[in-house]
Image (cartoon, rainbow, N blue to C red):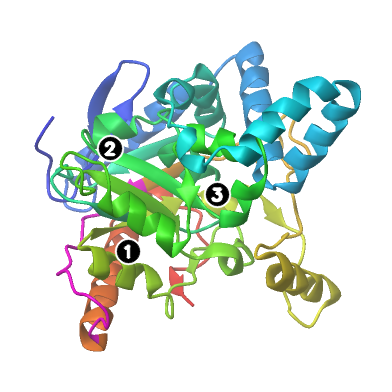
Amino acid sequence: MGNQGGHDLVGYDYQHRQLYTLQHPSTTSEAKQSEVSSLHSSKRREDESGGIERVLQLLAVFSHSLTIYPLIPIFLLIVYAIYNPLRVILPVLLSLILPRSFTQRSEFLRSLPIWRLFASYFPIHLYRSTPLPPTRKYIFGYHPHGILSHGAFGSFATEALGFSELFPGIENSLLTLDSNFRIPIYRDYLLLLGMGSVSRASCEKILNTGGIDGKGTGNGITIVIGGAKESLEAVPNSMRLVLKDRKGFVKLAIRNGASLVPVLSFGENDLYTMLSDLDTKSFSGRVQQVFKKTLGFTVPFFYSKGPYMFDFGITPHRRPVNIAVGRPIHTRKMVDPVDGAYLDEVHGLYVKELERIWDEWKDVFAQGRAEEITFI
């Protein structure tokens, strides 16, 4: 399926191992719109599963959720070391001594069945607006952050949603805080998943080494642009993006001659219910700001209690997440200092592409929205 309509989306059907087209409803007849709605509903029904599989899905999501905040893996490692010190000491020492480059990306780990269980829990679907040739390098900007960025992980750190089928020839790395790579064992787990540090040095290394020509061609990185600040805006049925003053990723693309690819995740903000009103003058708001300033990440006050059995604690709601990968914005390579006018121009094109995705697909993927997309 090399070609697709100008407004259509293409997804990957994991069950049947093939690509399929989700046609854009706004320019079709009423009967065709009904057909599109029916296809979208049928995809959701295909993801519904029986009792045993639902429990396995829950365990996959819950176990992943435990590994997101680094303090939890550290605690679990310490507890295990108390009872099995010899089994922990040697791997920890090796992880501390060996360089990050020693641990290589594992397609086996990225393709394990557990990740398909993880994705089908919600379910999550990944779509492309257009094919991306592997003759360029790419920076995917993921929006919004949500609470724990489950959609970003399922789409870009695993093969559960068919990234390599949708974008053949592109090797992508989901980026996270550099501090996560200072934790023994946990660091190697992230590296095996093909993840990397969001530091400038790490980004430029990925974009300029390896690939089909040894210079980064065919490589991609995914950055959750809004970061910690945006997680505090993860209100259900909203799409508030911290983006107005975020231009570092645009400058990174221009410096390295990479194409920018906006990614909009419908439903990411619906996976948890925020407990706080996020007023920075309130006690909870002040606590969150202290976490953000001292640790580099926030601890949003949230809970997950839905109508489904087994929903509890940090386990997210079973709500669909539909991720649309937009059209690329090609950049002209420019060394420092990057021209300010050109930087603003590219940033503006990036925002317009996000607006296009929202306007075209909000009536399909965000029918229960309480507000329109907002840039902060």
Q: Amino acid at mark 3?
A: Ser
Q: Is residue 369 above or below residue 344?
A: above
Q: Which mark is residue 36?
A: 2
Q: Which mark is residue 362?
A: none
Q: Residue at x 74, y 79 (%)?
A: 280
Task: Report which residue position mark 1 lands on.
Answer: 354
Q: Which mark is residue 149?
A: 3
Q: Residues within 10 Å of mark 2 (few under 14, many from 20)?
A: some
Q: Is residue 44 above or below residue 320?
A: above
- Quarter-wise, where is residue 301 in the image? bottom right
Q: Is residue 335 found left or right of 92 in the rendered image? A: left
Q: Is residue 265 visible?
A: yes
Q: CA distance from mark 3 to mark 2?
A: 27 Å
Q: Quadrant of the N terminus?
A: top left
The main secondary structure of the magenta stretch is: loop
Q: Residue at x 83, y 27 (%)?
A: 80
- Secondary structure state at the residue bearing disc 3: loop
